[in-house]
Amino acid sequence: MTNHLDAFIRIPKERIGILVGPEGKTKAYIEKRLKINLDIDSEDGGITITLTPEQTDPSILLRAKDLITAIGRGFAPETTYRLINNEDDVFDLIDLRIILGRSEADMRRIKSRIIGSEGKTRRLIEELTEANITIYGHTVGIIGSYQEADTARHAIQMIIEGCEHKTVYRYLQRKRTEMKKEKLQLWETPPEDR
């Protein structure tokens, strides 16, 4: 039985080289780990993802699309491998154009607020949620567990809505404490009670 499932995605042309990697190593790694083939059109940034015959899980197409989109939206390939290595990790994308409209001035201001002075805000969001964040063009990308990504997204939305940074940091501290307690309880609960 031949496998005819495929998906198409387009990423910025300037990110194609990052997806391919030195001597094609990044592309080859992704293809091997996910058991897919990537047909890349470097002229327009179009990528067709096809499952190989040995890949029997069609949901891998969605995982591959997320991974490639994440690279296209500014993540280093090594960071996106979280999506391969941990099936609980997700990719989330916030499109600032949808929230802010097309005003370049608003976009710059909000991106500056998310990044913070010398990258402090972005770094704190990453440290307190354990999610990875990248700001690229008109988007903010997040990779982490569902809970990490959700917490990071909420913090970013608070910033977009104009909350003071200290309010966002307090929220993040509270959520970090909650997440740590949940992890601790999971470890303390005997497996038969889970």
Image (tube, helix red, strand yellow):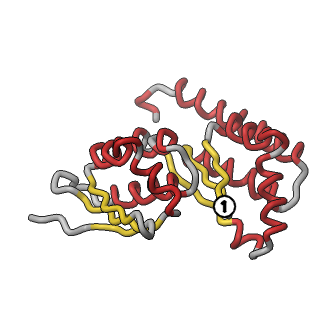
Residue occupying the far left of the picture:
1
Q: Between residues 133 and 147, which one lies in front from this camera angle?
A: 133
Residue 37 location, quadrant: bottom left
Determine whether, in the image, residue 118 is placed left or right of residue 67: right
Q: Between residues 187 and 124, which one lies in front from this camera angle?
A: 124
Pointer 1 local density, CA inside 10 Å: few below 14, some 14–19, many at least 20: some
Q: At which x and y percent is residue 77?
A: 47, 44
Q: At which x and y percent is residue 113?
A: 83, 52
Residue found 45% across the figure and 56% down from its top: 16
Classify the position of the N terminus by image quarter. bottom left
How many discs mark residues in the rendered view? Answer: 1
Residue found 64% across the figure and 49% down from its top: 134
Q: Between residues 95 and 71, which one lies in front from this camera angle?
A: 71
Q: At which x and y percent is residue 108?
A: 80, 61
Determine whether, in the image, residue 177 is placed left or right of residue 65: right
Element at label 1: loop
54 w.r.t. 4: above or below? above
Q: At which x and y percent is residue 149?
A: 61, 49
The residue where tag 1 is placed is: 137
Residue 126 location, quadrant: top right
Determine whether, in the image, residue 94 is placed left or right of residue 40: right
132 w.r.t. 137: above or below? above
127 w.r.t. 8: above or below? above
Determine whether, in the image, residue 76 is placed left or right of residue 86: right
Residue occupying the far bottom of the picture:
101
Residue found 66% across the figure and 56% down from its top: 140
Residue found 33% across the figure and 55% down from its top: 60
Q: Amino acid at mark 1?
A: Gly
Q: Between residues 1 and 45, which one lies in front from this camera angle?
A: 45
